[in-house]
Image (cartoon, grey):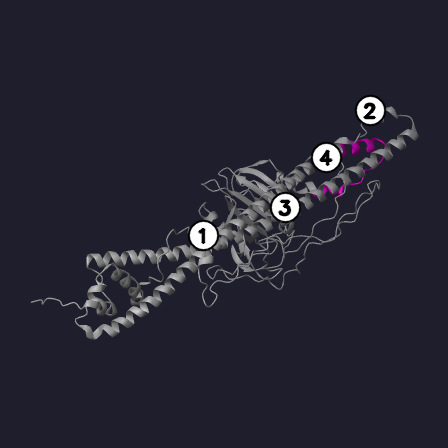
Amino acid sequence: MQTARTWSPAARRLRTPVAWFVALVLAGGAGLAVGAVPVAALPRPAAVDESTVEPPAEPVDPAPVDPDPTDPAPVDPDPSDPAPVDPDPTDPAPVDPDPTDPAPVDPTDPAGPAPDPSAPPTEGPGETAPGTGEPTPAPGPAEPPIDLGDVDFVDRSHLDAVVGDPGASGELADLAQSQLATIDEALRRAKQRSDDAGAAYDRAREKSDEAQAVVDDLEQQADALRDDVALSETTVALMVQRMRSGSYVMPPELAVLLDAQGDDDLLYQYGLLSGLSSDEARSGEAARVVAVEIERLTIDAEAAAEEAATLASEAERERDAAVAAQESLELQIDLAEQHRGELVLLLAELGIDAPDSTALADLTAARTSLRSAAPGTVNDLGYAAPMTAPSVTSHFGYRIHPVHGGTRMHTGTDFTVAGGTCGAPLYAVAAGTVIYSGAFGGFGNHIEIRLDDGTVVAYSHIMDGGLGVAVGERVVAGQAIALAGTTGTSTGCHLHFEVRIDGVAVDPLPWLAARGW
């Protein structure tokens, strides 16, 4: 038989709503992770008037540091990511982009610019390559372009006018040869302008990516604090619900306060209440500190987001400029092919052999070979692999940069093929439209294709002269679009392949696997 409970005066005073608060705080000591007094108005707390808050004896949060948008955001490698791949010591020595500008060429010199004497790149076994382009030095003042559309080229009518006049025929031959040199110089300048614009875009996009990384980091910190507070509030609410339903197991300390049978426990009760008061003060201060920190992170994230948006706009402008330079180069190539053929025929009738144009051949060699190249294999889902039977040499994720050192995010997957990667054909993985085809700083020669579903795939480090498609061109799955190389910041011939969805780089291997590769 249960006896009637006798309550002391002190205990009766505790049988009030205050007792619930006592239970909440002491429950924290019982392992329920209450942690702090719940903070109102979260997850987005109102700004706290710090002038009314006594600062803690020891500083809790460090002074905020505004990120420098020109400095790369520090990143720690994710332990779940694949181990970094060091470059194979048998690879050729990495070559950084030459920061010096090309020597100016006299446009009146009929010989035109000398061909590049450098040997073709060689592939090292087990090589790896950077996943992000290294910023290249800003170029000097660009030489003025030569628009071949403005040149009054000699033609058949001029040849007919000098028949039987050796002196006039010699002058016409000199003019035709001079115009051949002008074609080469126009192509060289157009190519240089395209390269410079691509390097500027590379620098701008890297700054934009770094600024966005700062924003993401600040937002993640604020979200983590909000989640912690929300978890504490949920835990407290669950405990109160259990207490009301009678399913809560009361810790011994709380039982002493609420279930005293006499006055002999008053001293112990007083000690507990004194500790409770101190805990309440510390909990309230901790809650205010958390609210201030969340507010600081939120303000910093908003400021960083504004800076990131500005840099993203600048990067987009640089991209537009790079694409415009590529389109201008394509126009000059078309005009060069048209007029050079006519000049060569005219000189042949005058008994003169025209010199070969290395400038034009370098820019169009891949197109000639790729037009006759066999297409890549297309599976039943309508997709092709970017190379034939490729092997992975470096995975997507954080790694030690093989050229510049330090931990960096590798935003793609590197592939090679057996039998030699230099000059190996690269294939469109699906139907789409070419949106970039040209130099791209540390990525070297670079092609981007927007697939019909909006996904953008990219191919980097393509060999010089290995671009087989132009901006605006439609491609189909399996079409040969380029030749693999080692241009840009690279340690050997390979393909750096990227997949971006809504502008965010994703791991290409699962993406390809989901499409049958």
- Residue 43 drawn in magenta: no
Is residue 344 visible to us here?
yes
Label 4: how many residues lie within 10 Å, few (<14), some (14-19) or many (20+)? some
- Where residue 386 is drawn, which disc sits there? none
- Judging depth in this view, the residue of 455 and 174 nearest the camera is 455
Badge 1 amino acid: Ala
- Where residue 157 is drawn, which disc sits there? 2
Q: Which residue is mark 3?
A: 201
Residue 124: image quadrant is bottom right
Q: Position of residue 334 (x, y in %)?
A: 70, 34
Q: Position of residue 438 (x, y in %)?
A: 64, 43
Instruction: Please indicate whether residue 342 sits to the left or right of residue 172 in the image.
Output: left
Measure the alpha-carbon separation of dots 4 and 1: 67 Å
The answer to whether residue 332 is above or below residue 274 is above
Residue mark closest to the camera, 2 vs 1: 1
- Judging depth in this view, the residue of 124 and 208 nearest the camera is 208
Badge 3 amino acid: Tyr
Residue mark closest to the camera, 3 vs 4: 3
> Magenta stretch: dominant SS?
helix
Measure the alpha-carbon separation of dots 2 and 3: 45 Å
Badge 4 amino acid: Glu
- Where residue 337 is drawn, which disc sits there? 4
Q: Residue at x 74, y 42 (%)?
A: 189
Q: Which residue is mark 1?
A: 47
